[in-house]
Image (cartoon, rainbow, N blue to C red):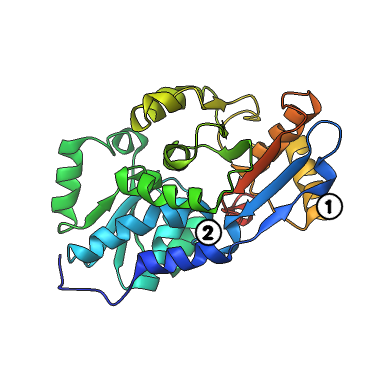
């Protein structure tokens, strides 16, 4: 379904937000091993449309606006930060929203209840059907079923998502030697890595088992000279995607007490736990200046308790 226009300027809002997000120093993490560790607080942009979720959505929403769509449709699991961010963004900018949810109980988590509260229509599907989410024939059928909405892939993992993520690179000073962020689909990392200069090495912390495959999925979106300027580690998956252990929870609690920064259990908690161990093991040069990117999603902690 289409209309002529939507009264908004999504890209301008993103650009303005980028100028106002703070970089917080983690002074207690520096010393003999590294000389500087900072955190870019993307999580402070919005309590729900937070972190990288916003940047992966903005060009998708802008395209939907320019093409005259009134409805967006996207995909996610029962704990999906992307899904609730899309629901909140759709409400903010006047779109109707539909969420295709992995699993047949689309009101079973706090996250999904939040999606409903923001006005998103949820449609639960089997895990088998959900695996077809990137299949062109399946997407054609979904488009027909829901009256031709603007379809955004799971996690905003498309060219528009990478383009939006590239805006994050504009907030990163050239003085940093290492950039650390969580990597679920690799969309944010690909966007950032495509813009940053080659002297800055990017480390993606995958929160799931076997996350190394992301390296090969990211490389096609980068110039060849940048293929060796990033890597993915999945050492700190803590049992798999969405899994948490007492050790991880204890670390997150201590980190909050020390810094007043809340980490999320799926992504940034695992990233910071892993980074701390890498520093302790001496895996960085002593003159390293490390920037961690807080990609938001802390509202998901409530639904996982």
- Position of 135 with respect to 106 (left or right) is left
The structure residue drawn at horizontal position 21% and vertical position 64%, both measured from the top left corner, is: 66
The structure residue drawn at horizontal position 17% and vertical position 51%, both measured from the top left corner, is: 143
Residue bearing mark 2: 50
Asked if 112 appears above or below 127 in the picture, the reply is: below
The residue lying toward the viewer, choosing from 45 and 300, is 45
Dot 2: element: loop
Give residue 251's position: percent from left, percent from top.
78, 41
- Position of 25 with respect to 194 (left or right) is right
Give residue 134's position: percent from left, percent from top.
27, 37
Label 2 close to label 1 by CB (< 8 Å): no
Is any part of residue 53 visible from this angle? Answer: yes
| First reached walking from the N terminus: tag 2 or tag 1 | 2
Q: Find the distance from the CA under tag 2 to the CA under tag 1.
A: 22 Å
Label 1 crowding class (10 Å Cα cut-off): few <14, some 14-19, many 20+? Answer: few
The structure residue drawn at horizontal position 42% and vertical position 38%, both measured from the top left corner, is: 194
- Position of 7 with respect to 53 (left or right) is left
The structure residue drawn at horizontal position 40% and vertical position 59%, both measured from the top left corner, is: 86
Q: How many marks?
A: 2
Label 2 crowding class (10 Å Cα cut-off): few <14, some 14-19, many 20+? Answer: many
Asked if 172 appears above or below 221 in the picture, the reply is: below
Residue bearing mark 1: 258
Residue sticking out furthest to the bottom: 7
Q: Quadrant of the N terminus?
A: bottom left
Give the image quarter of residue 227. top left
The residue lying toward the viewer, choosing from 294 and 251, is 294
- Position of 153 with respect to 138 (left or right) is right
Is any part of residue 101 visible from this angle? Answer: no
The residue lying toward the viewer, choosing from 227 and 100, is 227
Give residue 213's position: percent from left, percent from top.
45, 22
Give residue 101's position: percent from left, percent from top.
37, 48
């Amino acid at each position: 379904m289409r209309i002529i226009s939507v009264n908004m300027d999504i890209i301008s809002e993103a650009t303005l937000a980028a100028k106002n997000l703070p970089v917080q120093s983690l002074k207690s993490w520096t010393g003999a091993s590294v000389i500087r560790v900072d955190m870019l607080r993307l999580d402070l942009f919005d309590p729900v449309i937070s972190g990288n979720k916003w940047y992966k959505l903005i060009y998708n929403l802008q395209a939907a606006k320019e093409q005259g769509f009134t409805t967006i449709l996207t995909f996610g699991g029962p704990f999906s930060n992307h899904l609730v961010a899309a629901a909140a963004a759709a409400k903010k900018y006047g779109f109707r929203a539909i969420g295709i949810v992995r699993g047949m109980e689309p009101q079973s988590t706090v996250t999904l209840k939040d999606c409903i509260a923001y006005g998103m229509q949820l449609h639960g599907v089997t895990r088998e059907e959900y695996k077809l989410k990137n299949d062109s024939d399946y997407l054609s059928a979904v488009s027909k079923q829901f009256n031709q909405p603007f379809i955004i892939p799971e996690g905003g993992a498309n060219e528009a998502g990478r383009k939006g993520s590239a805006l994050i690179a504009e907030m990163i000073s050239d003085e940093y030697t290492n950039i650390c962020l969580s990597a679920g689909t690799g969309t944010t990392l690909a966007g950032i890595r495509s813009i940053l200069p080659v002297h800055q090495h990017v480390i993606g912390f995958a929160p799931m088992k076997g996350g190394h495959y992301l390296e090969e999925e990211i490389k096609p979106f980068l110039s060849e000279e940048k293929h060796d300027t990033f890597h993915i580690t999945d050492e700190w998956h803590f049992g798999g995607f969405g899994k948490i252990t007492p050790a991880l929870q204890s670390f997150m609690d201590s980190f909050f007490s020390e810094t007043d920064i809340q980490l999320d259990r799926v992504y940034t908690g695992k990233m910071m736990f892993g980074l701390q161990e890498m520093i302790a093991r001496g895996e960085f040069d002593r003159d390293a200046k490390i920037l961690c990117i807080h990609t938001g999603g802390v509202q998901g902690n409530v639904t996982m308790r």
